[in-house]
């Protein structure tokens, strides 16, 4: 009967003192993944449709023929707004988690969340100043030097 020892250094009595971990389970796992992927690709090739008709490659959407190009170019502002939304939405998640545990966190938690809100507000002010939140045709340019200020006044 093997006695169980609790602790950080407990190990079975027959275990060698070798620090190397066996790699054969990882090799078997990798081989299984490769076999499954090759099998899936082979089956889809064998069982897939092989007919080529004139209309096979044409796009068809909801029973209607396409009326314009499939590739639409979106302005980068859409992606910027989506990124800003994700950033500020995560801020709301962190603030909600803080609000749930506010009493247990005490003054240290209050100071930390105040610093967090300050950093997020600084980021919002920065985005506002560089014109990242504007949807006009020509974004504002901040004057960093006197020549830049003259260029902005002339424009």
Image: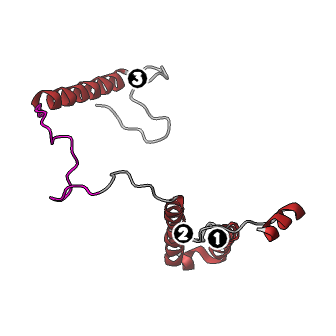
Q: Point out the stretch of residues depicted in magenta.
A: 48-67
Give the residue pinned by disc 3: 15
Q: Residue at 16%, 28% (x, y): give it.
A: 45
Q: Residue at 73%, 65% (x, y): give it.
A: 141
Marks 2 & 1, CB-CB < 8 Å contact: yes
Residue 38 lies in what quarter of the image? top left
**Label 1 packing within 10 angstroms: few (<14), some (14-19), many (20+):** some
- Image vertical order of residue 125 relative to residue 71, above or below: below
Say which of 83 and 136 sits in front. 136
Of callouts 2 and 1, the N-terminal one: 2
Give the residue pinned by disc 1: 124
Give the residue pinned by disc 2: 88
Of callouts 3 and 1, the N-terminal one: 3
* Residue 46 included in the magenta stretch of the image: no
State how far apart marks 2 and 1 are (Cα). Answer: 9 Å
Name the image quarter holding the C terminus.
Answer: bottom right
Q: Residue at 29%, 23% (x, y): give it.
A: 31
**Label 2 packing within 10 angstroms: few (<14), some (14-19), many (20+):** some
State how far apart marks 2 and 3 are (Cα). Answer: 52 Å
Say which of 108 and 37 sits in front. 37
Query: Where does residue 93 sit, x and y in percent of width and height?
Result: 49, 70
- Image vertical order of residue 7 relative to residue 79, above or below: above
Tell me if 15 is positioned left or right of 66 in this view. right
Tell me if 141 is positioned left or right of 151 in this view. left
Query: Where does residue 85 sit, x and y in percent of width and height?
Result: 50, 67
Query: Where does residue 55 sit, x and y in percent of width and height?
Result: 15, 42
* Residue 58 included in the magenta stretch of the image: yes
Q: Nearer the viewer, mark 2 or mark 3?
A: 2
Q: Residue at 52%, 66% (x, y): give it.
A: 81
- What colour scheme was applied to this rendering of the protein? secondary structure
């Amino acid at each position: 009967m093997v006695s169980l020892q609790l602790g950080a250094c407990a190990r079975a009595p027959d275990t060698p003192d070798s620090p190397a971990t066996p790699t054969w389970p990882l090799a078997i796992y990798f081989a299984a993944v490769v076999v499954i992927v090759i099998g899936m690709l082979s089956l889809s090739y064998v069982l897939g449709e092989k007919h080529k008709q004139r209309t096979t490659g044409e796009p068809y959407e909801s029973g209607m023929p396409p009326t314009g190009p499939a590739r639409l170019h979106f302005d980068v502002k859409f992606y910027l707004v989506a990124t800003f939304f994700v950033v500020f939405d995560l801020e709301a998640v962190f603030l909600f988690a803080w609000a749930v545990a506010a009493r247990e966190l005490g003054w240290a938690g209050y100071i930390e969340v105040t610093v967090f809100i300050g950093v997020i507000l600084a980021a919002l002010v920065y985005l506002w100043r560089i014109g990242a939140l504007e949807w006009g045709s020509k974004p504002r340019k901040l004057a960093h030097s006197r020549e830049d200020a003259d260029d902005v006044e002339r424009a």
